[in-house]
Amino acid sequence: MDKNRIVTLTDWLRVLSDVIHIMIAVSLLISAGFLLINAFIKLKSVDGSSVSHLLNEILFVLIVMEIFITVITYLREHRVTFQPFLVVGIIASIRKILTIEAHLSIAEEIGREVFLRSMIDLGVNTGIVFILVLSFYLLAKVPGPTECPGCLGVEKVAKKLETLLNTKKDG
């Protein structure tokens, strides 16, 4: 297969990839809207359980929106950034912590095993939040030449692959 055909094929594959990413982005945005509307519809009273459920749903919408932003960034710049994934992990862990806290505060009577399991879950999720925040901080501090830190540029990877293919072809 000659080089021009490979370039043409990869160009078409990139267009197809972009179309699929656009469909994913639209689906994420629509889903986030429905989730948010549904969360407010289900809010029947302003008691602890309802507000906790609303907060849980809002945090889930925030996770979906972070993934949406990651897809948009990929479409615009054809690079993947790691920060949004760290933010999703942080939000998901905080969401889990709040859910555990809500269940513990609502429960009439808590058994020893449930209490111990809940405390372990709280400790693990708190540790995860700490590690992810530290990772986010360190990633933001890493200086990059001209690109953003934590980015994996598709163009860079494509050039490296092309160099490797040319080297193998010539050798």
Image (cartoon, helix red, strand yellow):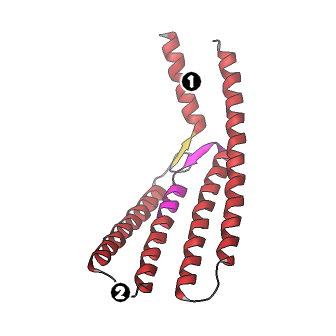
How far separated are the C-alphas under marks 1 and 2? 64 Å
Q: Which amino acid does label 2 sit on?
A: Glu
Q: Residue 86 location in percent, x, y? A: 48, 58
Q: Does 87 appear in magenta? A: yes
Q: Report the residue at 64% width, 50% height from top.
A: 71
Q: Is residue 26 visible to us here?
A: yes
Q: What residue type is labelled 1?
A: Glu
Q: Is residue 47 above or below residue 79?
A: below
Q: Is residue 133 above or below residue 97?
A: above
Neighbours of disc 1 within 10 Å: few (<14), some (14-19), many (20+): few
Task: Name the disc covering residue 162, or none.
Answer: 1
Residue in the foreground of this view, choosing between 11 and 64 = 64
Q: Residue 121 location in percent, x, y? A: 35, 69
Q: Report the residue at 60% width, 89% height from top.
A: 46
For label 1, the SS is: helix
Residue in the foreground of this view, choosing between 53 and 145 = 53
Q: In this view, does 162 lie above or below 100?
A: above
Q: Residue 81 location in percent, x, y? A: 55, 50
Neighbours of disc 2 within 10 Å: few (<14), some (14-19), many (20+): few
Stretch in magenta = 77-90
For label 2, the SS is: loop
Quarter of the image where one finds residue 17: top right
User: Which of the two labelled residues, at mark 1 and mark 2, occupies the earlier sequence position?
Assistant: 2
Q: Does 112 appear in magenta? A: no
Which residue is label 2 attached to?
Answer: 109
Q: Report the residue at 65% width, 12% height from top.
A: 2
Residue in the foreground of this view, choosing between 57 and 84 = 57
Q: Nearer the viewer, mark 1 or mark 2?
A: 2
